Amino acid sequence: MAIELLVLVPFAATLLFLRSRRKRGTSRDAMQTSMRHADPERLAPLLAYRARFREAGFSPWVSANSPNEESAEVRAFGALIYSSGLYRDFDWPEWMRQHGDRYAAQAALASADFETISRLLSAIVRKSQFVDGQVGDLIESGWMLAALDRLAELTKEVPPGRTPTGAA
């Protein structure tokens, strides 16, 4: 009996933790709280990268000999997703399994709302911690620029002192 409790109690605690984490990551309150931090002024440095990504000859890589080693500039861009208030803490692998294919094509980003763009960019920077070159590949393909362009569209009509809205 004592051995069974030693096994079941940690297991039950883990399940409760995972359940509470999932609820926190998908609840309406959690999304609204996180959107309050996405001030268009805080997004400006992130959106400024659009001009850089459009420059002829821009490469996200350290050198041509190291195609999976992202430049310091690209790593700084990834860090801005966190500091801009855009980053969302949610079950990104599960969300990407359910919604990621829908937005794999650049054209699909044109209909994405603010929360969807936030989740996509959050999932990308999280995945980049496990997959070398993730952000660089998306910059090189033009997908990241399309996502930033959509984000700019969504934020340009936001009156001063307000935040973008929309939930996926």
Image (tube, grey):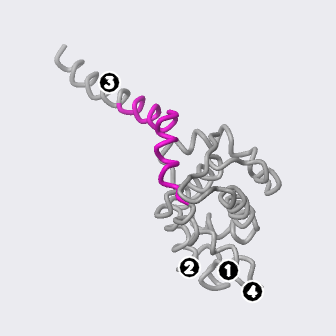
Q: Which residue is mark 4?
A: 57
Q: Circle 4: is it few (<14), some (14-19), or many (20+) Cα within 10 Å?
A: few
Disc 2 residue type? Glu
Residue occupying image coordinates x 67% and y 80%: 52
Circle 3: residue type = Ala
As measured in the structure, the alpha-carbon distance from the residue carrying label 2 to the one carrying label 4 is 14 Å
Residue type of the residue flagged with mark 1? Arg
Q: Are marks 2 and 1 in contact (CB under 8 Å)?
A: yes
Pointer 3 and pointer 4: residues touching (CB < 8 Å)? Answer: no
What crowding class fits label 3: few (fewer than 14 Cα within 10 Å), some (14-19), or many (20 or more)?
few
Disc 3/disc 2 C-alpha distance (Å): 44 Å
Could you say which is closer to the camera, residue 156 or residue 98? 156
Q: In the rendered structure, which segment of residues is drawn in magenta?
A: 17-39
Q: Quadrant of the N terminus?
A: top left
The residue lying furthest to the top in this view is 1
Label 1 and label 4: CA atoms lie apart by 10 Å
Question: Which element carries disc 3, helix, strand or loop?
Answer: helix
Residue for badge 3: 12
Q: Magenta region, mostly helix, strand or loop? A: helix
Which of the two marks, 1 or 4, is nearer to us in this view? 1
Residue 91 drawn above or below residue 61: above
Q: In 3D space, how far apart are the residues under numbered discs 3 and 1 (Cα atoms)?
A: 49 Å
Mark 1 lies on residue: 52
* Residue corresponding to mark 2: 73
* Distance between mark 2 and mark 1 Cα atoms: 10 Å
Comes first in the chain, label 3 or label 2: 3
Q: Quadrant of the C terminus?
A: top right
Residue 33, position as x, y percentages in the image: 46, 44
Q: Earlier in the sequence, mark 2 or mark 4?
A: 4
Q: Position of residue 98 (x, y in %)?
A: 66, 37
Say which amino acid is labelled 4. Gly
Quadrant hosting residue 78: bottom right
